[in-house]
Image (cartoon, rainbow, N blue to C red):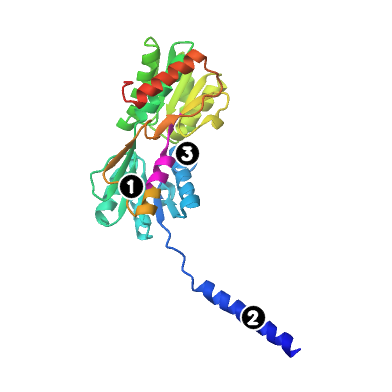
Amino acid sequence: MKKIISLMMAFVLLLAAGCSQTSSFQPKERVKIGIMLSDVGLGDQSFSDSAFKGLMKARDKLGIFFDYRELKESETYEKGLTELVEAGNDLVIGLGFMVQQDLEKVAKKYPKQQFILIDAVSDLPNITSITFKEDEGSFLAGVVAAMLTKTNNVGFVGGADVPLIRKFANGFIQGVKAVKPEVNVQEVYAGNFGDDKLGAQIAKQMIANGADVLYAAAGFTGVGVLREAEMNKKYAIGVDSDQYFYAEKAVVTSMLKNVDVALYTVIKQYVEKKEVPKGTVELGLKENGVDLAPIRVVTLSPEQQATLERWKEKATSGIAQ
């Protein structure tokens, strides 16, 4: 019996030693990322959701921690960004051109903090700016719209009449005109990125005016455009992420703005090298910053597919426009 008890005691001691060694182990410090989302926030089925996708990939593949703030909770961008800095995040990200002014205020208060600004350009030394060549991707969307229209009448819906959204519009119009100069392009700016009902109203009016292909660069407002196009058996083109699943009988493609790819790439560089690019990084077709989602709903003829590929090659080389 004593022998059995001695063996049991030895086993317990071994376990205790093992637990002691485990408890003294200190895991490698993990990078912390904080992001202030754009005005609509999560569920916009566009810009913020794409950024969140990139952060989740970085969490799963790179082992980072991340935190986020939404405007509906923080009330101001400045407050949300300040909270993220004071929470000890290694990188603090401001998502969208509307965040720029408050991000720069906070960056001046915390000169040693590294910030990333998506979709706008800042001159401050502790802000890395990441922008996209939306006009290149929108050009291809215009090529698709021109090939599909039967009425020679298409529509563009922007979330706001600002330079950034004008890049979408100008690229789209140029793509349409490159294939069919005679096509009329209706152009409307909603003044709102978060109202799908407003988007539906605008789309309904465009369809009444003859448009049979609609392209929306308007966040959640654009979702209303897509669904209205579906209700009226017209074609639609989504934006930022692949929006086919929001109107599966209408969305032939989407102009992908790969915010998730951009964020993951920058975070990966920081995890590996503890630094991010300086100044401004601009991403287009060549850098996989923008692209088109797969063609669905319709089947392009061999001639149409060749046309799209030809214009994509030209746009990638920077000579399409």
Is 13 left or right of 141, judged from the image as shown? right
Task: Answer whether residue 265 is magenta in the image.
Answer: yes
Between the residue at mark 1 and the residue at mark 2, the CA separation in whole angstroms equals: 52 Å
Query: Vertically, is 17 above or below 188?
Result: below
Front residue of 198/25: it is 25
Q: What residue is shown at x 40% (from left), y 53% (from top)?
A: 33
Mark yes or no: residue 159 visible.
Answer: yes
Q: What residue is shown at x 61% (from left), y 79% (from top)?
A: 14
Q: Circle 3 sits on which residue?
A: 44
* Residue 288 coordinates in the image, percent (x, y): 40, 34
- Which residue is situated farthest in the right direction here? 1
The local secondary structure at tag 3 comes to: loop
The quarter of the picture where residue 32 lies is bottom left
The quarter of the picture where residue 113 lies is bottom left
Between the residue at mark 2 and the residue at mark 3, the CA separation in whole angstroms equals: 55 Å
Q: What residue is shown at x 35% (from left), y 60% (from top)?
A: 86
Instruction: Give the mark nearest the N terminus, 1 or 3.
Output: 3
Between the residue at mark 1 and the residue at mark 3, the CA separation in whole angstroms equals: 21 Å
Residue 116 got which mark? 1
Q: Circle 2 sits on which residue?
A: 12
* Main SS class of the magenta portion in the image: helix
Instruction: Give the mark nearest the N terminus, 1 or 2.
Output: 2
Q: What stretch is highlighted in magenta?
A: 255-266
The amino acid on which the numbered mark 1 sits, given as a three-letter code, is Ile
Q: What residue is shown at x 38% (from left), y 53% (from top)?
A: 272
Residue mark closest to the camera, 2 vs 3: 2
Is 314 left or right of 223, judged from the image as shown? left
Residue 318 got which mark? none
Quarter of the rendering occupied by the N terminus: bottom right
Query: Vertically, is 12 above or below 110?
Result: below
